[in-house]
Amino acid sequence: MEKPTAGAQPQPSRLREAVRQARIESAERSAVIFELHDAEIARLELVNEALDPLYAEIPRNFEQFDRGITRGEPPRLWLDMVAHVSMGRDRRTYRFIQDTQNGPVVLKESASADEIVESVTKYVARRMVERERALATHDRTALWYRRRHWWQSIGMFALGVALGIAVVIAGAVFVAGKF
């Protein structure tokens, strides 16, 4: 390795120059990635706007559906607590995904926003029907439980009365036997 002479300026090392160049390239890539991220969000906002008429039809007291875009990595358009739309790896394909106990399930994958909106519409309708059925089942179950509970309460009361009478009789026999 050559030593710099006393009056000459030291030459930048190759590694230092390579690191400098790598930082420049990284900054350029970051700008491109940021632009791609913004493009993904813009595409999701288009789907969100296309869903406005659908969400306007959902009754106000039906709080299951609350949509919004999260700007994380990857950005997502959440439709409810378990379903969202995100962009595929190619950043052109929409992916309609539902999170389940067994992991995420892709419900629809398409480059067309209209197809995704149609799939979301069917999903919302199915979820509304499921909720109605669950509430109807709950009402019938609650009625059955209340009836069952009422009969159990009467049975327990009768058992308590019978045990009380038996204790009083046993006490009377015990006391009568001592005198």
Image (tube, helix red, strand yellow):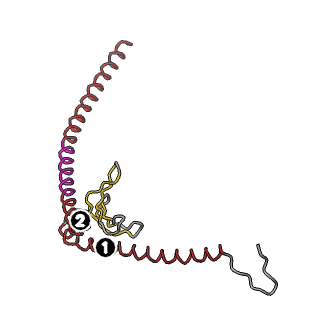
Residue 126 drawn at (x, y percent): 19, 56
Residue annotated with mark 2: 116
Residue 80 drawn at (x, y percent): 29, 61
Residue found at the very far front of the displayed protein: 2
Rendering quarter of residue 83: bottom left
Name the chief secondary structure element in magenta.
helix
Q: What stretch is highlighted in magenta?
A: 126-143
Residue at 30%, 74% in the rendered image: 45
Quadrant of image for the C terminus? top left
Quadrant of image for the N terminus? bottom right
Q: In this view, does 156 lie to the left or right of 26?
A: left
Q: Is residue 98 above or below residue 56?
A: above
Q: How far apart are marks 1 and 2 (CA)?
A: 12 Å
- Dot 2: few (<14), some (14–19), or many (≥20) neighbours within 10 Å? many
Residue 37 drawn at (x, y percent): 40, 73
Residue at 20%, 53% in the rendered image: 130
Q: Which mark is residue 43?
A: 1
